[in-house]
Image: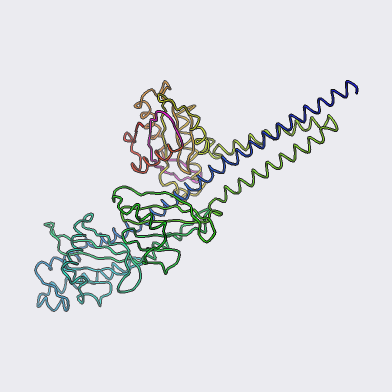
């Protein structure tokens, strides 16, 4: 065999070996990327559902708060207090209240004006089940159903009267939220609440009662679309009673839950203090041979458990799509390598094409990595990058870093009011300000409306927390400057900000720590931004 042919065979053998090695490396990289992206996308999906659950819980709380504000406004009206003032001198009976008042024309006039006010006020309340004024002994003095005015006493037994009276006096400014009940009059579920009314000396003289049908809050929840999990279902349970407030079907309403997981959650959280703050978590389960993911928010203030459930096939659709895409990408790469390997054995010219193709593939891989680990809109790193980089950060006990979260408050409201383009403008504006005040520092977009800046403590400009917080406060002052939109409007942006100095190892849980701090402190105030060392 000639020396030239031997050299050619040796060249082909070396080329084949190189191609095989490339094949193994690319397949391994594809598997690694698939696993990493799959896990990160799954976690992002669960966190997205958690944010949705939190948002829906806030809708429920806002709905109840609006009901409470409505009742408080009604109870403070002059017509209400004038009528109840007479309860100190006139003994109202179960039947014939006005007749027992005798010739006292002022009582009759006050009752007539209060009844008119009750009717007119109730006409402006949506989903109203009933609005009424009661004496301290629970005699109905006015009612939106005027047939009930002066004709009934809701709690005749002294013990039940005392139970209601004590509950009102123990409530916030005399308000007692009785929760979700089945109305004895309409047979429908409603939110029931009572507001004590006091005279000028601070003594109770009666109360106002309000019932609002729960269909209102259910309609409110259903009217808010959930992108990506359109077929998800809501369930809400009263942990104090174990009954459904609403569920997948109307038949479940006000019935005891028998779902083992729900009972487990009730048992776990029912004794949580009312001021502990909302608790959000998730779990997966199988029902009828199908896999589901559930995210729940427990509201200790009312002892309510809100659960969102969806099939994993829909909830993790993005993850599944990414796996398929990467699988196809791997197959394409494999096919190309095989084809080029065959051609390379026949002619050297094709070898050059193979090298060119591999170079293109490397560029494709680099572009994929860039899109995967960076936020396209703002150009900063994304949550996946944060999770990966956190593992690379030194875990020496003496190493420390500052982590500062800037969370855009009510970002969804900006998108709703001004449009998504305005929301994008605010996001880019936020990053530009952060880059200006924290040049060459790592900035991550870890959520739809939140950014984290990582600052090494050995940086000459940030050797102590005061220097850091001074810079954070100055950046905050620039962030809240109104942003001009293309249509001439101005957006006044608010932020929730928190800072942490972390010594030792770091992982992705830092996001949850910062988010919890911003949720607890609420909207940021200049000079009063929360800072901790852990």
> What residue is drawn where x is 66% and y is 44%?
327
Observer-nearest residue: 57 or 208?
57
Observer-nearest residue: 388 or 133?
388
Magenta segment boundaries in residue numbering: 482-507
Asked where in the image residue 329 lies, by quadrant, the reply is top right
Q: In this view, does 187 lie above or below 175?
A: below
Q: Is residue 494 within the magenta segment? A: yes
Q: In this view, does 8 lie above or below 59?
A: above
Asked where in the image residue 529 lies, by quadrant, the reply is top left
Q: Quadrant of the C terminus?
A: top left
> What residue is drawn where x is 39% and y is 39%?
513
> What residue is drawn where x is 30% and y is 66%?
211
Q: How many labels does the image show?
A: 0
Q: In the rendering, at what x and y percent does residue 342 appear?
A: 81, 36
Q: In the rendering, at what x and y percent does residue 51 appear?
A: 44, 49
Asked where in the image residue 130 lies, by quadrant, the reply is bottom left
Residue at far right of view:
1
Q: In which quarter of the image is the N terminus?
A: top right
Q: Is residue 203 above or below residue 45?
A: below
Q: Is residue 203 left or right of residue 405?
A: left
Q: Is residue 486 within the magenta segment? A: yes
Report the colour scheme.
rainbow
Q: In the rendering, at what x and y percent does residue 126 appear?
A: 35, 66
Q: In the rendering, at what x and y percent does residue 112 appear?
A: 20, 73
Observer-nearest residue: 98 or 317?
317
> What residue is drawn where x is 55% and y is 50%?
316
């Amino acid at each position: 065999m000639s020396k030239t042919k031997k050299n050619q065979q040796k060249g082909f053998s070396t080329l084949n070996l190189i191609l095989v090695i490339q094949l193994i490396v690319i397949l391994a990289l594809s598997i690694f990327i698939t696993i990493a992206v799959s896990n990160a996308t799954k976690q992002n999906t669960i966190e997205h559902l958690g944010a949705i659950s939190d948002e829906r819980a806030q809708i429920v709380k806002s709905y109840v708060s609006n009901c409470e504000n409505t009742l408080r406004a009604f109870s403070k009206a002059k017509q209400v207090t004038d009528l109840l003032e007479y309860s100190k001198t006139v003994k109202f009976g179960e039947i014939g209240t006005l007749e027992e008042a005798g010739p006292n024309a002022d009582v009759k006039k006050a009752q007539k004006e209060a009844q008119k006010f009750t009717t007119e006020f109730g006409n402006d309340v949506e989903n109203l089940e009933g609005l009424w004024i009661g004496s301290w002994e629970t005699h109905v003095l006015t009612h939106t159903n005027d047939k009930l005015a002066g004709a009934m006493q809701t709690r005749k037994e002294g013990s039940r009267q005392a139970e209601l009276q004590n509950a009102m006096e123990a409530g916030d400014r005399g308000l007692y939220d009785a929760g979700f009940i089945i109305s004895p009059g309409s047979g429908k579920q409603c939110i029931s609440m009572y507001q004590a009314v006091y005279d000028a000396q601070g003594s109770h003289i009666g109360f106002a009662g309000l019932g609002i049908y729960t269909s209102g809050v259910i309609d409110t929840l259903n009217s808010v679309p959930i992108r990506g999990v359109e077929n998800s279902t809501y369930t809400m349970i009263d942990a104090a009673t174990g009954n459904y407030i609403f569920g997948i079907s109307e038949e479940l309403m006000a019935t005891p839950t028998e779902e083992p997981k729900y009972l487990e959650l009730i048992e776990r959280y029912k004794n949580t203090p009312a001021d502990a703050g909302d608790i959000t978590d998730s779990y997966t389960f199988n029902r009828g041979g199908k896999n589901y993911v559930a995210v729940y928010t427990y509201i200790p203030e009312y002892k309510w458990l809100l659960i969102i459930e969806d099939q994993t096939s829909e909830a993790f659709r993005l993850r599944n799509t990414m796996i398929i895409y990467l699988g196809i990408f791997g197959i394409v790469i494999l096919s190309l390598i095989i084809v080029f390997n065959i051609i390379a054995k026949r002619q050297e010219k094709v070898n050059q094409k193979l090298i060119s193709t591999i170079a293109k593939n490397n560029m494709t891989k680099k572009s994929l990595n860039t899109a995967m680990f960076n936020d396209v809109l703002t150009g900063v790193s994304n949550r996946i990058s944060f999770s990966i980089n956190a593992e690379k950060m030194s875990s020496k006990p003496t190493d420390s870093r500052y982590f500062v979260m800037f969370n855009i408050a009510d970002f969804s409201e900006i998108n709703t009011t001004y449009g998504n383009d305005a929301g994008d403008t605010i996001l880019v504006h936020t990053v530009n300000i952060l880059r200006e005040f924290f040049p060459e520092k790592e900035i991550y977009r870890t959520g739809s409306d939140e950014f984290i800046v990582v600052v090494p403590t050995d940086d000459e400009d940030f050797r102590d927390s005061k220097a850091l917080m001074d810079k954070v406060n100055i950046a905050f002052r620039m962030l809240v400057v109104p942003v001009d939109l293309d249509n001439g409007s101005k957006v006044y942006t608010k932020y929730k900000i928190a800072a942490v100095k972390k010594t030792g190892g770091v992982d992705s849980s830092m996001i949850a720590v910062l988010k919890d701090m911003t949720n607890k402190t609420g909207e940021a105030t200049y000079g009063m931004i929360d800072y901790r060392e852990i």
